[in-house]
Structure formats: structure tokens, C-alpha cells
Amino acid sequence: MWNLHNIGKLRGSDMLAIERKNEILDKLRAEQRVLVSDLAEYYNVTEETIRRDLDKLEKEGRGLNLSWEVRNGIVTHTKGTWAATPEGRIVRMADQIAYVNHDIEDAVRAGVLDPATLPKDCTAVLGQTKSARITTMINSILAHSDGDVGVGAEENEAFLALRDFMYATVYVDKNAKREEQKVDKVIGELYDYYLNHVDRMSNFYIQLAYQEGRERAVTDYISGMSDEFAIRTFEELFVPRKWHVL
């Protein structure tokens, strides 16, 4: 679980920003609201990139017309004061539940976490698997949300304890921290390379470099890479290949 993973999972690393903006606009028209974190993960870009997309859509007069409630849900989604609306509060709660459980799955897959070490008092309440834990929390929210968003005290206590366990173990794991240092190196080298080779990016980012500066263009380009794409690009650019002699 390193920085590149937090950038999001691949949905086409070279997707043009104009295509992304058009899709976001379609989603807004269809669903009446969007969640920055969901869009960032879906499009494999940073939340800041999505926020700029939303601002540009509005400023260009494309009919976005975000309500106060939507903006309030966006700015309160991650931390701090909770949203003023039940909709804003439930999506924040849903993301918290999803992130913890997906991080558990990722940590197990990466060999950082043994599922047998999960706190027994937490799994006894929430379940042994990702699906079971998410289902338990959903059912608890449904059972305790009468007029406002709520969750059962037992389930909430178990979930918070599980989240604390992840912070105390996985998120500060020395192996994961060593991987983070490698990621910093990968991102730094890619940034320096494209800063000096703007023409190696797709046409949209070349245009963006002229409009908003190459630093912004390179940052957006790299933020659109998945783990695998970034590592593969780094290897292609900086790791010597073996010669195959017939």
C-alpha cells in the first residue's frame, strides 16, 4: 500500500482530460451529484484533479450549476466536520467502510498482513471476510438510520477498533514504508524525465503544458498512471534490457 496505489486503479492511463470532463458532466446530469473520491478512483487521477475538472466545467458554462449541498458534501467528505445533509454523511461513511476493508485485502495480498491477526473481537462482530464485514456495516446502518444516518453502537465500536488496528500495524509497517521510499524514487524520476521531455506525453498534456505550464501537465500526467503503468514506464525508461543474442 504505497503512494501509487492511492492514486487509484487503472482505467486507461492515457484517457484525455476532455473525455473525463465530458463523462463527469454526463454523470452529474444523470445522478445529480458526484463524489470526488469516487471519481478520482474511477478515473485514476488525484482528487485535486477532479476538483479542477469540476471548477473548469462550471467556469466554462457547461451547465454544472453545483448546489450548496453538493459542494458541502465535497469539502466535508474526507475529514473534519461532517456534511450537512444525510446524503453527504452516508457517502462519507460508506467510503470509510470501503477503504478500511479494501486496505485489509490489499495488505493481505501484499504479504504485509496475516488475516489471522485481525482483532478477534472485531471479526466476531463484523465478520471474517471483506464481504461479510461490509455487509454487516450496511445492515447496521439500515437498521439504525431513522430520519438520519446512524449505525449500531456494537458495529461502530468494532469498526473503529479495526481501523485503529490498521493504523497501528499496517499503515506504519516497516516493509510498507520501505516500499514508499521506492515509490518516491519512481515518481521523482518520471517527473524529471517528462519535465524535460514534454513531447513524450499525449497530445492533451502537451497542450496543457503550453496552457498551464509543464509542471502542471506533468503532474496531471503522472497522477493518471496506475501502479503497473508507472513501474512499467520507469523500467522502459531507466532499466537496461538484456540483449538476446541468437
Image (tube, grey):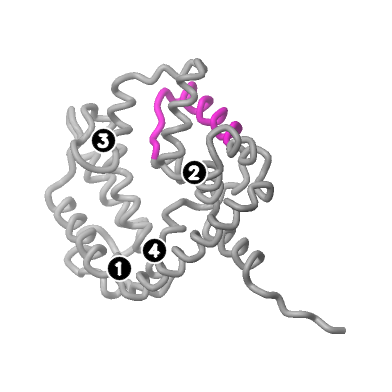
Q: CA distance from mark 2 to mark 3?
A: 20 Å
Q: x%, y% of residue 43?
A: 52, 42
Name which of mark 2 and mark 4 comes first in the sequence.
2
Q: Say which residue appears at 41% left-offset and 31% top-offset.
A: 34
Q: How many numbered marks are there? A: 4
19 over 123 or under it: above or below: above
Return the residue nearer the eye: 229 or 30.
229
| Residue that appears at 48% across and 21% down | 29
The residue that disc 3 covers is: 76
Q: CA distance from mark 1 to mark 3?
A: 26 Å
From the viewer's side, name the closer residue of 2 and 217. 217
Say which of 207 and 130 sits in front: 207
- Assign a secondary structure to mark 3: loop
Front residue of 56/22: it is 56
| Label 2 vs 3, first from the N-terminus | 2
Name the residue carrying label 2.
42
Place residue 193 in its image quadrant.
bottom right
- Magenta span contains residue 26: yes
Amino acid type indicated by mark 1: Val
Q: Residues in magenta?
A: 17-36
Quick one: label 1 or label 2, which is nearer the N terminus? 2
| Amino acid tagged 3 | Thr
- Do the CB atoms of the residues marked 2 and 4 lie less than 8 Å apart? no
For badge 4, the amino acid type reads: Glu
Disc 2 versus disc 4: nearer the observer? 2
Residue type beneath disc 2: Tyr
N-term mark: 4 or 3? 3
Q: Quadrant of residue 143?
A: top left
Q: Residue at x 54, y 39 (%)?
A: 213
x and y, in percent, of residue 102 in the image: 38, 57
Q: Is residue 53 magenta?
A: no
